[in-house]
Amino acid sequence: GAAGPATWAAKAFFRRATAREHLGYVSDAVADLAAARRLVPGDAGVAEKLEVLRRRQRQSELKPSAMFAGILERELAQRQREEQARSLEEKKRRREERLQRQSASAAEGS
């Protein structure tokens, strides 16, 4: 059958939504399915898939750990970098003191 442009575009949105879902881009998949639904409002497959993904989207939005994980990881990494910098500064200071003591004792010996 000769499918109209709306049907063809809806299929494209549906396929891209499926790909995005598999990649974990649920919000993008929902947007594509919503576009497909506007083009073919009577398509039960599109409506069903859209509802399933909207449920998944709501569930993932309820998990604050996913939202804050990146922030906490970056904060931890920053603290570790700061600690390493402090440790390095302390080592440099102790080395400088040791060198000063050595040069002072060498000067006394000559």
Image: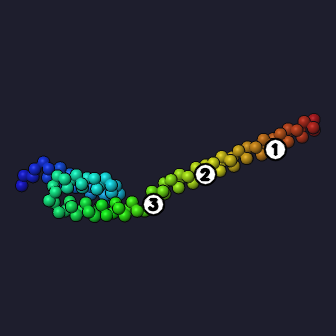
Q: Is residue 100 at least partly visible in the picture?
A: yes
Q: Residue 98 carries which label?
A: 1
* Residue farthest to the right, as pictured: 109
Q: Along the polypeptide, which appears first: circle 3 or circle 1?
A: 3
Q: Quadrant of residue 29?
A: bottom left
Which residue shows up at 61% across the image and 52% down it?
80
Q: Is residue 19 at least partly visible in the picture?
A: no
Give the foreground label among 3 and 2: 3
Residue ID for mark 2: 79
Give the foreground label among 3 and 1: 3
Instruction: Give x and y (percent) for residue 89.
Output: 71, 44
Give the foreground label among 1 and 2: 2
Which residue shows up at 22% across the image and 64% down it?
48
Q: Residue 64 carries which label?
A: 3
Give the residue type at disc 3: Pro
Give the Cα distance between marks 1 and 2.
29 Å
Which residue shows up at 34% across the image and 60% down it?
57
Instruction: Give x and y (percent) for residue 60.
Output: 38, 61
Q: How crowded is mark 2: few (under 14 residues within 10 Å), some or many (20 or more)?
A: few
Compared to residue 55, the image places residue 77 above or below, namely: above
